[in-house]
Image: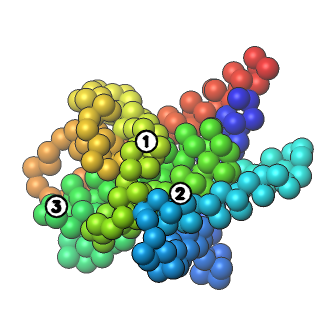
Amino acid sequence: MAYAFALALAAALIDVTLGYPRWLARIVGSPTQWLAAWLRIVKTAAEGLSGRTALALYLAPVAVAAATIMQWAPSGPLGFAAMALLTSTFSGRQSLDVRGREVASAWEAQGPYEAFAAAEALGADETEPRLGRAAAASIAARFADEVAAPTVFILIGGLGGAALCRALTLAGRLCRESREDTAFARAVAALETWTVAPAARAGALWLAVAAASTGANLAFAAIAAAAPRPGAPAEQAMLLALGEARRDEPRYVRQALALFRRAAAMELATLAVAALAAVASG
């Protein structure tokens, strides 16, 4: 387990400090963009196939590519650094923080209507009339799907686990956002229920722990709550921790970002302690 904890910690540190460079995303795209493009190809090519077959067609190349890279990666510090760098591209701590700040900054500088575009990019629920709550819930859901769940998958399967987790969470989110009710969407939701959803509850746990550190503990009730989607417990934990704002204002989004940062820092500290303990015991 020493290697798994060290890899998860190194990937998290790279994600926090470097993230995925925007200039590189403009030139060659990002893993998320590549997966989204592959998903569109599969959904078009697999039309008429069963949902499970289409899902297997979508995930199999991702798993094979990750396994090949893991197999042929050099050993030693250079190989570990390469694995950590590649694995970090499937997490979104810095990206999430940037997108959350864009919502708050646009709201503060230009007003709520101008902030809606940034909130939509963040994935805010269009049915929620209050922008602050929608943005906060989206930050929590993204934290669960793009940070907490990938960390669990990294501990289980390294680069391959991170790649499969990101591929599955992306497919699930896009299917839900388009309100797709196809055999493929149902197959994705079924697989998420047994894989991503349990891992994403770690996001609710970290948010509850972070909220408890400031004196609030209502969020712990959300950890075992029903999950119509993987990020739902984290969303509930975030909203319970923040409470109901007297009026809709950007400060609510800033508070959500602060809670997310504390939760991410606590997760990082736990990975560091676990890695050190694993090394010491090994």
How far apart marks 3 and 1 lie (CA) works out to 28 Å
Instruction: Choose mark 1 or mark 2, whichever is in front.
Output: 1
Q: What amino acid type is highlighted by mark number 2?
A: Arg
How far apart marks 2 and 3 lie (CA) works out to 26 Å
Q: Is residue 161 left or right of residue 142?
A: right
How far apart marks 1 and 2 lie (CA) works out to 15 Å
Q: What amino acid type is highlighted by mark number 1?
A: Trp
Q: Is residue 217 left or right of residue 25?
A: left
**How far across and how far down the image is residue 144, in percent?**
42, 47
Q: Which mark is residue 204?
A: none
Q: What amino acid type is highlighted by mark number 3?
A: Glu
**How far across and how far down the image is residue 232, in percent?**
30, 46
Q: Secondary structure at mark 2?
A: helix
Q: Which mark is residue 194?
A: 1
Identify the image quadrant of the C terminus.
top right
| Residue under pointer 2 | 166
Q: Which mark is residue 128?
A: 3
Label 2 Cα neighbours within 10 Å, binned few <14 / some 14-19 / many ≥20? many
Q: Is residue 152 left or right of residue 226?
A: right
Q: Secondary structure at mark 3?
A: loop
